[in-house]
Amino acid sequence: MCAAAARPRVLIYILRHDVRLSDNPIFLAASALWSRKRSSIDAADVRPREDSLVSKEDAPAFTHLLPVYIFPAHQVEVSGFVPASSGRCPYPEARSRVAGVWRTGPHRAKFVAQGVWDLKKRLGNLDCDSGMEVRVGMVGDVVEHMLDWYEKDEGDGGHRADVAGIWMTGEEGTEEKVDEAEVERLAEERGVEFKVWDDEKYYIDDRDLPFDNISDLPNVYTTYRKSLEPLRLRPREPLSPIKQLPPLPPDIPPQKEPFEIPDTLDGLTKALLSPLEADPTFGLPSPPCWPTNVSSAHPFSGGESAAQDRLAQLISGGAMSSYKETRNGMLGLDFSTKLSAYLAQGHLTARQVHAAMVDFEEGRGPGKEIAGYGKGENDGTAGVRFELLWRDYMRLCARKFGSRMFGIQGIQQPPTSSRKGAEDPTPHDDHRPPRKRWKMLDRSGGAKDFPEMTREVFTRFRSGRTGIGLIDAANRELFLTGYTSNRARQNVASFLSSRLGIDWRVGAEWYEFLLTDYDMPNNWGNWQYVAGVGNDPRQGRVFNPVKQALDYDAQGEYIKAWVPELRGISLARSVGPNNDEVDQQKLMGLYQAWRLDEAEKERLGLKGVEWVEQPLVRIPFSVGRGRGRTEGKGGGRGRGRGSKGRGFKRMGNEEKAGWRQSDGAANGVV
Ligand SMILES: Cc1cc2nc3c(=O)[nH]c(=O)nc-3n(C[C@H](O)[C@H](O)[C@H](O)COP(=O)(O)OP(=O)(O)OC[C@H]3O[C@@H](n4cnc5c(N)ncnc54)[C@H](O)[C@@H]3O)c2cc1C
């Protein structure tokens, strides 16, 4: 037992989506406060960004730092951490509320584990006896167990250690807020200092927002963006690197039973994946299989080290500068940055991305051979900044709208409390579109609505067997790799919510399960935006996935990559000696296989195949030479996406093939 005077004073840092050493305000504060105490260096020498740190008065006096990453049991399935001999997991399965799918799938589980391990290694390498612990359980349970353990009487009236404080970063999710409140309650009960920090992983820090009250956040992104232009001047500089941290405490509370924490990355990954592997099909009778000769667009490993490598490679390889021209691509590594998963987990911060781009723009560091080096902001770097601000904006929407992010009417749902009236932040209150009727998985919405059929349709959607090439390619890619492009995501979300009329939240939950880059505000905000219940100022627009394929997959390469059954379609048609053109009829057959002629179906072995013969939707669309003829009038330009716009179109009179449209979709919402 330690004598009271020499008893360690432990500061516990609960890591969440801030799994990095660099540009991390909590690590920097812990490092600075501790070094100051040890060496009596003047505060100014160790506080490069004073406002980022706690003041001397607020700071708990601590001798040791215990960083702990917790896999939260309601969001990640943790039964794989229970050894076979130790009985059952005390928590319910981590499944989603509406569709009942796993909350965290294999792609993200692996990525998160890699990130946690990378940080553990980085901390260990600091050569100051630092490190990190991994725990599983509900956050409150883990913290309570730690506090109990440290408080435990050692037999002579003393504690194992004093807990000097608990720090964590704040998050916007309603579940995360509950976790924060629980930790705060426990800390208060035990007289332990508690502080929730603003994580500084966003493009614009909270302290620099152009409003004091979140209700003043504009309901339209463009208005928000304009209030902040020029975007290049807004972000702060990343925090200075950390060289030293307080050591880990001499005694560390073990993981609460019945769980056991593996001591290798391999073991950690296995524990996370084993419950999911009990059914590798995830309930799909015909799950997508890896096609030959195709690679993931997102083969990247998780972690701060890999994030820094990816960022450096984007700059020195030129992809950051060509972003504007390539960002609507769907195949390959570099059409977009693939930084989303790093940003979501906090392996990287948006201002680190900004700083790397500024270095390039000002002719510092790597990228000398790339056009535009040292020549200021270019279209590509400006485009990335524009998107990073979108990410900030979605996060602020989550703060503003709270639990309405998850309701079926999205943020269009009027607030339930006294916030009604002048403070009601719902967009377009005066001309809100009539409520859409959604098809649900578990109950009928009325006559002609059959949940059993909806479940079957949802299964085909998830399996990549709708019969619409672009949608099927995107859903198979997502299932197999954990990534699909923004272009594909928009089309898929529009297809499920508007063409099929299914409760958009099951789509959001399916994405939450599969996406490596899942991020609550971005996923739920984008899904409802596209479904017409979010903050798209032009509500009710619908993507035409055939027109979109023509615009963004004109040679059908993306569809052929992920739907190998269609690879045998030869698109070239000879129109003279040494002169070929794309056979439009066949191209339309690639985009919707029901349009292939019978002989071609026979040749490809597609005769009688359900998704070919009975697609969920048939979209009338014809092409002449060059361009396609679309249903109705042209759609909006949308979000500065280049000349092709976002591809929203009015809906036409689709043939109702094997699947009845929802009322909303059949009404041809615009
Ligand atoms: C239905 C739907 C669901 C989505 N779910 C998520 C999600 O869970 N997590 C997530 O990070 N993004 C989500 N997005 C946004 C976007 O599709 C991804 O951020 C992007 O495709 C990730 O690839 P990237 O990093 O190469 O993006 P890039 O095109 O290189 O963009 C750079 C960064 O900007 C941000 N960004 C880009 N597009 C958007 C956008 N539309 N909204 C908000 N931020 C954006 C991301 O952080 C991204 O890493 C979703 C979009 C849709 C339509």
Image: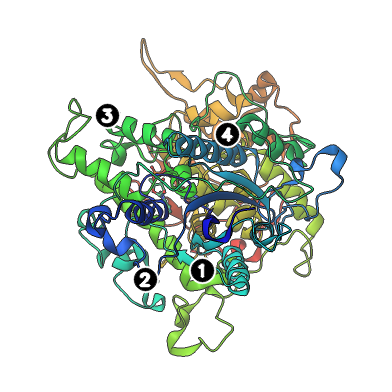
- Residue at position x 66%, y 50% in the image: 253
Instruction: Give the colouring mode of the picture.
Output: rainbow
- Residue at position x 59%, y 70% in the image: 181
Mark in the foreground, 1 or 3: 1
Residue topped by disc 4: 481
Residue 336, horizontal then vertical, whole percent? 38, 38
Residue 381, horizontal then vertical, whole percent? 26, 43
Does 240 appear above or below 177?
A: above
Residue type, label 4: Thr
Residue 511, horizontal then vertical, whole percent? 60, 48
Residue topped by disc 3: 316
Q: Tell me which label, 1 or 3, sits earlier in the chain.
A: 1
Q: Is residue 392 left or right of residue 190?
A: left
Q: Is residue 643 visible?
A: no
Label 4 element class: helix
Residue topped by disc 2: 57
